[in-house]
Image: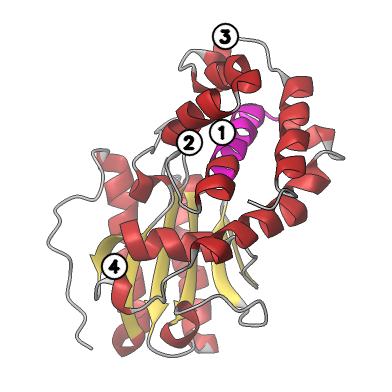
Amino acid sequence: METVKANRGYPTPHPEVNEIIEQVLKDAEAILQSNFLGMYLHGSLATGDFDSKSSDIDFVVVTKDGISDVSIEALKESYAHIFSIGKKWARALEGTYIPQKEFRRYQPSDGPYVCVHEENFYLAHHESHWVIQRHVLRNQGVVMAGPDPITLIDSVSPQDLKQAVKSFLREWWAPILQESERLEKRDYPVYAVLTMCRALFSLETGEVASKPVSARWVQIAHPKWKDLIEWALDLERAALPDRISETKAFITYTLNQSQVNF
């Protein structure tokens, strides 16, 4: 399977974001060489709701085979360099490196994989939300280099997508209700509210939509939360008080809804 650089121009309208994405691609190709298969953007960069103030730069590098210890060490050094020179977007990088065979479908026992998150480089297994990420990558992934992701990833059924959302809510968000300090972080309640909107949308439709689209949908389908969601969507929210107790109630509501047989 031939690897071809995508003819898409710059992947985002933000020059500094493009610069760091291009650096990640350049380093991956140089270090992995013949083992490099492709690089893809997902998350908000793929679904169309990228916010330069708060969004992550989500990416996946796919390899033909597993990554050697030598290559892992070289990748670690490359990210140490990116972090050390103080690139503005370094902290926003959230990526993983995965062999082609294991990219096709999510298996909890696969891995661990090279991961980058918030200026940390480590090895970890993927969690259940990677069913959702594969769905986004297959249908909306931005190709930086490599074959069309639809040829690399099996389709994800609506039922599998719903089950993944339920698992993610149980594994990640249920414990957060007991960890108030996380919700007290700046902008985290906003992130939580909009993530719950995406979860509710997926649970009831078996599809994935951007946070703004999901939020507007939930305002109609679940009007009880209309005001809280409007607060989360407000671009001037920094001047508004955090609504932590309401956010907790919305997370609890979403967890309860996930137990309904849609």
Q: Are marks 1 and 4 in contact (CB under 8 Å)?
A: no
Secondary structure under the numbered disc 1 in the rendered image: helix
What percent of the width, then of the height, locates residue 134? 46, 66
Q: Which residue is mark 2?
A: 214
Give the farthest residue toward the right: 178
Q: Residue at x 71, y 42 (%)?
A: 257
Label 1 with label 2: CB-CB less than 8 Å: yes
Give the label, 2 or 3, closer to the camera: 2
Q: Earlier in the sequence, mark 1 or mark 4?
A: 4
Give the quarter of the figure containing the N terminus.
Answer: bottom left
The magenta-colored residue range is 184-199
Q: Is residue 11 left or right of residue 262?
A: left
Colour scheme shown: secondary structure
Q: Which residue is mark 3?
A: 239
- Give the Cα separation between the discs numbered 1 and 3: 18 Å
Q: CA distance from mark 1 to mark 2?
A: 8 Å
Mark 3 Cα-neighbour bin, 10 Å: few <14, some 14–19, many ≥20: few
Give the spatial CA distance, label 2 vs label 4. Answer: 35 Å
Magenta region's main secondary structure?
A: helix
